[in-house]
Image: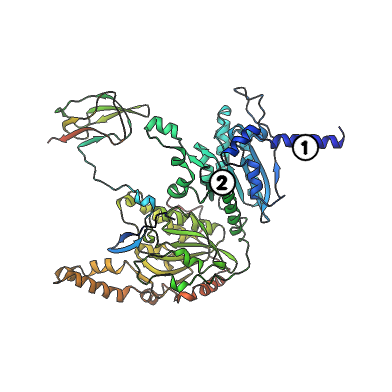
Amino acid sequence: MSLRRNILDLRKRKDEVRKGGGDEAIGKQAAMGKLTARERILAIVDEGSFHEYDMFVEHAGTDFDMGGKVLAGDGVVIGTGTIYESPVCLFAQDFTVAGGSLGLSHARKITKIMDHALKMRVPLIGINDSGGARIQEGVNSLAGYGEIFFRNTLSSGVIPQISVILGPCAGGAVYSPALTDFVFVVENISKMFITGPAVIKSVLGEDISMEALGGARVHAEITGNAHFFALSEKECFEQIKTLITYIPWNNTQKAKTFPVKEPKSKYKIQNIVPADARLPYDIREIIKSITDGSEFFEIMELFAANIVIGFGRMNGETIGFVANQPKVLAGVLDCDSSDKAARFIRYCNAFNIPIITLEDMPGYLPGVDQEHAGVIRHGAKILYAYSEATVPKITVIIRKAYGGGYIAMNSRHLRADFVFAWPMAEIAVMGPEGAANIVFRKEIAEAEDPDAMRQQKIQEYKDKFANPYVAAAKGYIDEVIEPQETRKILLHALRISASKDVQGPSKKHGLPPF
Amino acid sequence: MAEQEKSQIIIVHSAKYQTTYTKKYENRKVWVEPNLNHINSYIPGTIIDILVKDGQKVAAGQSILILEAMKMYNDIKMPFKGKIVKVFVEIGQKIPKNFLMIQIEPLD
């Protein structure tokens, strides 16, 4: 063959693979509001930056008449590209080819790009859209999943791993996303579960739709498996690109810095918080009144909304924010919010992102359901995560800091680097109402007018303890600050903490309560 | 964020906080003390056999009913020495989870 014919032949071969499962299968995919695997990758990466590998890999099946079948790229696309010029490795399962089912070659393509990402220390983005194991390939398919899980674990805390669920992801396949750092889901498209509706119906008699069992909203709101929820694939891709701007390429680097922007003037920090500690407000307004350009990229917005987590920038640098949300469940700590915050704190610590904690919470959520769901071990996660973290850790106590919650929310005692408090902060074992009922139980019971006595004693307790000065007198708080000074002081504290270096005792690994 | 912005109250240490509920919190299971005299199904299934009759005295640990679920025969035993007050199911009946199958009462 002449060179030209060779080139034409190559192009033909590549075009053939790019057709995936063919027009009919692609049409079905489009009818479900889904893009194809390659379209998805191209929508995420910088224009012209994507290179695909292993296009000509063939499937490994020989049994059940699989030998003669051609499966384009064995149902998965792998490659490298850039997002805002940051390098990434990607794979995308192609549902149009044998339902994106995972056989040996398919798995080997995925593990190849995973190995590459780890070796090059760059983020990995995996797009899941698969019917599951390729049953015709038997145990080889299971082996494939195992190899993926192992690499997810090996890479954990070294490179950012992002999972995007854009189709079914069921049975064992769900565990790769579950092992990664961030999971993205899209309404009506993502479906994740271990056991599907048909089996649940046949053995348990429970009749439930796929969407109600493991749809995007379920995972974003109830299970906490998903971190980002979108209404369309397009919105999802924008979320992924934004996330990439906030995180570093790997655990030895810092996230990219951006030009400093002052917060927007519409956020008046001194006007957001009601003086009465029992009244709600949206803590995100406080975050936006502090961050560069008032930008805040919230994570797990729908799950355990009583705690808010996410990224913002201060002085152009990525900061992880953890904040109690008085607007939801009074901002209490509970099983879900502890789990949510603890995982995020560990993420920030692994990837060199300083943590700012904004505290306003009345304590732990009372209830049999909480106790029986294990609020002790879940609550312990947050203590563990803060104590273990060695990145700069700064706390601002906005209003209430009561009891165990005060300790848990990055207190001095867990080695916060700086603890600031607003003048209306109340740092105490519990709120004045509860404390007065216990401390003055006898006086209240014996009073002629118990209610009047109770109010008097609540006021007495408030005057004495419901302020930041008792804690400040012991040095548990470094400085009581005016709300308007918050950003300035945080910027200063972050500058002072920039080359923080602390070493814990040597160990193989700790044993966090999970 | 919780879609419903309905103002609700959370009580922590005697203080009432104005806030909103999450859907998950609203749907939480309220705990009720289990009635030890009720033998409920702990899994949905089919009644394969009933080994006792109303009024019968039964020793602790004696089999009283066979419930098939998940392709397994589950041998339901008398939890303490007692009397069968009433059998609420019949052989072949398909029952959901938490269905009252047999009411019993203890005997000294």
N-terminal label among 2 and 1: 1
Quadrant, the N terminus of chain A: top right
Position of A431 compared to A30: left or right?
A: left
Of all residues shown, which one is farthest toward the front? A31
A394 or A236: nearer the viewer: A236
Q: What element carries label 1?
A: helix
What residue is shown with label 1?
Answer: A11
- Where residue B55 is drawn, which disc sits there? none
Residue A376 in the image: state x and y as whole percent.
36, 54
Q: Judge whether A33 appears above or below A385 on screen.
A: above
Looking at the picture, do discs 2 and 1 lie on one chain? yes
Q: Judge whether A7 appears above or below A287 on screen.
A: above
Report if residue A61 is visible in the image.
yes
Q: Which of the 4 quarters of the picture holds residue A396?
A: bottom left
What residue is shown with label 2?
Answer: A164
Residue type of the residue flagged with mark 2: Val
